[in-house]
């Protein structure tokens, strides 16, 4: 099954080559629902191996963007549950691997602008999915739960764009409904 999944990701890179796409955005729903269901460290090892194989196949001008999510659909562990796990995988992979920050994928009270500033500082912020949430991944309009949050995040982005290392263009998705998103680029 894992071989089939990695082969599918490699096929996605082939499609990127054919279409001129620059970014492969990945979010994995994989995880466990109860203690002892699987070996957590072994799962991380298997994920790292698969990501490395796909990363090696990327072209010089292509990026791998890794998104994290605290929980859902798995409720005990999610394989990439937070920005630290995504960052650790991306750091090990290399400069073409970067983290996707989805503003709806955090525990209540998380200081997302700190995460953004840290990832910018490390040249590992690759993209955003902007939305809002009250309890979980509600996918509400950006700013619905905390209207000032977007300003605080953008303040860090604007400050971070000009600071070394140079930040490459980032992919942004602002949720407008569950079925469509508006995408734009932040210039580097």
Image (spheres, rainbow, N blue to C red):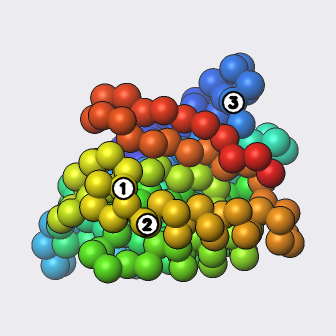
- 53 shown above or below 4: below
Percent of width and height locating residue 12? 57, 31
Closer-to-camera residue (38/148): 148
Q: Tell me how far mark 1 sits from mark 2, CA to CA.
A: 7 Å
Check residue 21 in the rendering and tell me which mark sits there, or answer none. 3
Q: Which residue is mark 2?
A: 149
| Apparent side of residue 119 relative to residue 36 in the rendered image (left or right) | right
Closer-to-camera residue (31/68): 68
Percent of width and height locating residue 160? 73, 69
Residue placed at 48% from the left, 32% from the top? Answer: 182
Closer mark to the observer between disc 3 and disc 2 = 2
| Apparent side of residue 109 relative to residue 113 in the rendered image (left or right) | left
Check residue 143 in the rendering and tell me which mark sits there, or answer none. 1
Classify 10 Å Cα crowding around label 2: few (below 14), some (14-19), many (20 and above): some
Q: Mark 3 near mark 2, Cβ–Cβ under 8 Å?
A: no
Picture quadrant where residue 108 is located: bottom left
Closer mark to the observer between disc 1 and disc 3 = 1
Question: Which type of secondary structure does the marked residue at label 1 adopt?
Answer: loop
| Apparent side of residue 51 relative to residue 111 in the rendered image (left or right) | right
Classify 10 Å Cα crowding around label 1: few (below 14), some (14-19), many (20 and above): some
Q: Mark 1 near mark 2, Cβ–Cβ under 8 Å?
A: yes
| Apparent side of residue 157 relative to residue 164 in the rendered image (left or right) | left
Residue placed at 74% from the left, 42% from the top? Answer: 62
Question: Which type of secondary structure does the marked residue at label 2 adopt?
Answer: helix
Residue 71 visible in the shown view: yes
Picture quadrant where residue 179 is located: top left
Q: Tell me how far mark 1 sits from mark 3, CA to CA.
A: 30 Å
Residue 31 visible in the shown view: no
Question: Which type of secondary structure does the marked residue at label 3 adopt?
Answer: loop
């Amino acid at each position: 099954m894992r071989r089939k999944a990695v082969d599918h990701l490699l096929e996605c890179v082939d499609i990127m080559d054919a279409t001129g796409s620059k970014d492969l955005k990945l979010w994995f729903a994989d995880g466990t629902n109860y203690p002892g269901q699987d070996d957590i460290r072994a799962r991380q090892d298997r994920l790292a191996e698969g990501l490395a194989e796909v990363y090696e196949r990327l072209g010089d001008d292509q990026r791998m963007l890794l998104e994290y999510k605290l929980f859902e659909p798995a409720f005990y562990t999610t394989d990439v549950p937070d920005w630290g796990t995504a960052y650790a995988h991306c750091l090990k992979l290399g400069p073409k691997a970067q983290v996707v920050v989805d503003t709806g994928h955090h525990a209540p009270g998380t200081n997302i602008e700190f995460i953004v500033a840290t990832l910018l500082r490390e040249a590992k912020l690759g993209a955003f999915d902007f939305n809002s949430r009250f309890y979980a991944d509600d996918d509400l309009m950006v700013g619905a739960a905390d209207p000032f949050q977007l300003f605080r995040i953008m303040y860090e982005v604007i400050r971070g764009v000009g600071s070394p290392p140079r930040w490459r263009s980032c992919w942004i998705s602002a949720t407008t409904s569950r079925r469509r998103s508006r995408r734009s680029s932040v210039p580097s």
